[in-house]
Amino acid sequence: MADPDAPPDEHAEAASSMEGDGRKTVDGFDLVEKVASGGATVIWEALERATGQTHAIKLLQPNLIKDRDQIATLKHEQKVGSSMNHPCVIHTGGFVKTKTNVYLVMELFKYPNLKAALKNNSAEVRANAQKIVEGVCQGLSHIHEKGWLHLDLKPDNLLITPTGEVRVIDFSLSEKPAGGLAALFGGGATIRGTRTYIAPETILKKPKTTATDIYSLGVTFFEMLSGRPPFAGNDPAHMLRQHIKEAVPPASGFNDNLTAEADKLLDRMLAKKPKDRPQSPTEVFAEFRTATLFKKDPHELLREQRRREEEQELEGASLLDSRADAVRTLKGIKAPAKPVKKQRRRADVGGEAKKAAARKAEKEASQPQAPPPGMPQGYPPGYPPPGYYPQPQFAPQPQFAPQPGGQGQPPPGQYPPVQYPPPQYQPPQYQQPPPSASPSNAQPAAAPPPQPPPQSGAPGNAPPRPPEGKTAPAGSQVQVPGLTRPTDAQHASQKETKDEDLPLMTELPEII
């Protein structure tokens, strides 16, 4: 590492400025990616050219490289951090100051801080709560053993991995415990720290001890378990008064999965008087290790959360995604329903819809219609299907004696014209309507149910034969052309033939 007291070399003076001003390198380091930034410093991931190793560089902002207080703070942080050697404390390397660069080289631990982890996945943090408490207490205990107080413990200064591994960072406010006259008369003229996590004795400018870090640690654990700090507000002065006077609210009031035992332990860490708190991080960890913090196992809650997220991801996957479909089938997750495409409604300008409907109806009318169900192919149009014939109903006619040769009557000795029904069809018999019915008030007689066609040659089913040379009175039996046929002197076309030889008739035969 470069000697902080050595004069700046030509390479450092020729180095370009920071990002935004075109800087890509700092002395012998190539800047790779910005990791974090604050008001006075920016932390970069940097590659050391000489060794090929990756480090974190904490750079002072270009407008502050001549600020004596900021330079002294960065140099103090390097002094405290370089004295630490613990896996739960970030390792700090050298301090470099040139005309164009002031920076601190540290171990690169590229994971989010506890604040960001709580925001992104609080269930995962609580599932690792015991491991996080253990790592923080071990790191803080090592800092105390080295003779320092951290004095700025908060979620922002704790880096954690998804499995709960911890690094304690930022020693810019670290001090040695008060001793001698300072322990009797006070802890300094200025109040330094973060208002949300500051201890009451720091606010009151009383001597700082290891219990001061315990209070800040208690606020941090309170936020980790409940999701928010115990005291909050927009007025800084009111927040400081809360630390001094107001009682600590139970953490279970913000997270109902916490037990009363967790409330009692946090309340003890946040006692107003330092003597009422645990006196070391080791004592804190011992109490946490034996305490039951949660009513329901946070690992089970984490598994439920991950299962819900996986189901939502699979439900949102494409129906054509075979991998997602296989996972859904394996886990018994119902496939998402196909989205229904909504049809846009368009305004019917000029009656276009009605015109289109009329054209469609005209087109359908012009096309040949398929025969109804049960109708054989090639059957003459207009004929009823086999086995059915419409049964006409007639009102009763007045009784009168027919005159030979009268209008509408056939000549004597001839039968009325006959219209033949379809092949193999025998019409049902019609009942004679009552003669007493009045023509004006008569109602159509109810049609009898259709009868099955009689067997060929059965004499009992033949229609009645009218007297020779006479026509049946209109009132005794209604003769319908094509329905009543004579029993003898049949027409040649009516002679018994085989069923398969009967032709399909489209015209009536000539009357002999």
Image (spheres, rainbow, N blue to C red):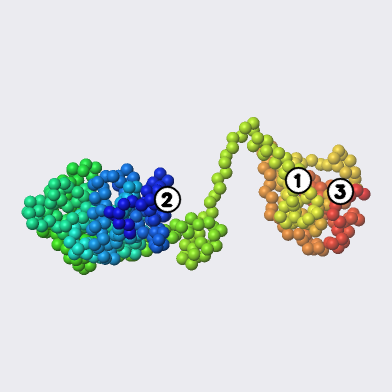
Nearer to the camera, 187 or 435: 187
Quick check: marks 3 and 1 in contact, CB under 8 Å? no
Nearer to the camera, 291 or 177: 177
Q: CA distance from mark 2 to mark 3?
A: 104 Å
Q: Disc 1 marks which amino acid?
A: Gln
Quarter of the figure with residue 367: top right
Q: CA distance from mark 3 to mark 1?
A: 25 Å
Residue positioned 59% across, 37% down in the render:
346
Residue 294 numbered tag: none
- Element type at marker 2? loop
User: Is the N terminus in the top left, top right, bottom left or bottom right quadrant?
Assistant: bottom left
Quick check: marks 2 and 3 in contact, CB under 8 Å? no
Judged left or right of residue 452, residue 180 is left
Q: Which residue is mark 2?
A: 24
Q: Disc 3 marks which amino acid?
A: Glu
Q: Disc 2 marks which amino acid?
A: Lys
Residue positioned 71% across, 39% down in the render:
359
Q: Nearer the viewer, mark 2 or mark 1?
A: 2
